Image (tube, rainbow, N blue to C red):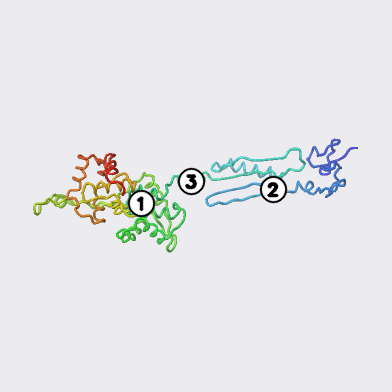
Amino acid sequence: MKANCISCNEQLIPNSKFCHSCGSQQKCKSCDTPIVKNAKHCIGCGISLVKANDASEKALNTIKFNQTLDSRSYEVAFTDNVGAGVVEVIRNMSDNQPQLKLYGLKNNVPENDSVTDVHQIEETVISDSIKEKEENKVDNNSEIPHLTDVENTLECSEQHWILVYAFYVSSFGKITFSKDILLKAYKDKRGTASRIANFSNKWKSLFKGFVKTVRTDEFKLTDTGIETVLGLIHGKITSAASKTLPRKKNQDRKKETSTKKKGGKTLAKSVQTEEFDLYKNTKKPSLSDFMKERGIDDNTANRILAIAYYIINICKLSSFSEGNIEYAYKVLSLNKRPLHLHQTILNAKIRNLWFDQDESSGKWKLTRAGEVHFDENFSKK
């Protein structure tokens, strides 16, 4: 006996379970009894047929739109009939706007089933410029060293140190921070009386392009501030460890640098101090404790060797300056400060091969001979 489709009324092929025209189910999957039009249950076994009858009305497709920084997403569901038109609209939008990318369609349709489970179409439309910024942000952050490594290797001015700490307390410039939080972080690591006294002035100088105010006691790094810190910690920007005084007129400079005889002694040329971290923290002892542990006596050459060893191997700096030695003598109140510091270091270089000088920077490096001599003669007690 000939039968017609219960959905589209097309004449069915004999013994077919599904309509060859619209694909709707014609017989119960459980007992193979023909389905009655508009029936909610099979007349043979009583199984529910609601899902089959309502399939064409359900929203079986989904379009997802996702946009970042700081995210915006939409999700739209629609039926198969509507879906074909919507996908075409999105394709046209992608073709007409080359700055937008349309990523691949995924359409998973179960085979040999009268009801299509969810046809999922995922569309992600992302601006190239936004995507590029996000990827660069991730790449930059993945290369940012730990603050401890920066503290052990970076040589820069105190103004730049404050900027570095602002960068880390603000989660690499992503969130705002307060002056109190910044001061605490800076004070914990680099707190000396002179630095804390000068903190406010150096902090104010950062507002010339590096830091901006969001609201009262809430600040944020500018793009220039972030780029400056990244340049410092990656070695692309150099910063003087201390400010150089203005050059004086030739006559005044000659008076200052020339040696003077007084009481039969030649006075030393003045050396400008250059600070370094000689205080105790969780990673290292103070310079004073280090010299006591190693039994450093009043011998000038041994003192300079010990200070150089501490700067290079304990503080993990690449070189030391005469200003660093001068700073250590003053802070530790060491007596018998050498009258001719440069000549004393030079003599140790020539006679003992302890030091070597970088001609371009004028700074000194500890040689392997100096390091071995110190380890062999001043081992930890």
Q: Looking at numbered disc 2 in the image, what kind of residue is underneath it?
A: Phe
Q: How far apart in space, not on screen, are marks 2 and 1 (Cα)?
A: 65 Å
* Mark 2, secondary structure of its residue: strand
Q: Residue at x 33, y 50 (%)?
A: 156
On the image, the x and y values in percent for residue 228 come to: 38, 49
Q: Looking at numbered disc 3 in the image, what kind of residue is underneath it?
A: Val
Tell me the tag on residue 56.
none
On the image, the x and y values in percent for residue 335 come to: 20, 55
Q: Residue at x 47, y 44 (%)?
A: 139
Q: Which of the two labelled residues, at mark 2 and mark 1, occupies the earlier sequence position?
A: 2
Tell me the tag on residue 284.
1
Q: Badge 3: few (under 14), some or many (20 or more) residues near its Cα, within 10 Å?
A: few
Q: Residue at x 86, y 36 (%)?
A: 15
* Horizontal side of residue 318 vs 105, given as left or right: left
Q: Badge 2: few (under 14), some or many (20 or more) residues near its Cα, within 10 Å?
A: some
* Mark 3, secondary structure of its residue: helix
Q: Who is closer to the viewer here, 239 or 131?
A: 239
The quarter in which the N terminus is drawn is top right
Residue sitting farthest toward the bottom: 216
* Mark 1, secondary structure of its residue: loop
Q: Badge 1: few (under 14), some or many (20 or more) residues near its Cα, within 10 Å?
A: some
Please give the residue where the numbered disc 3 appears in the rendered image: 138
Q: Looking at numbered disc 1 in the image, what kind of residue is underneath it?
A: Lys
Residue sitting farthest toward the left: 264
On the image, the x and y values in percent for residue 136 come to: 47, 44
Please give the residue where the numbered disc 2 appears in the rendered image: 78
Q: Are marks 3 and 2 in contact (CB under 8 Å)?
A: no
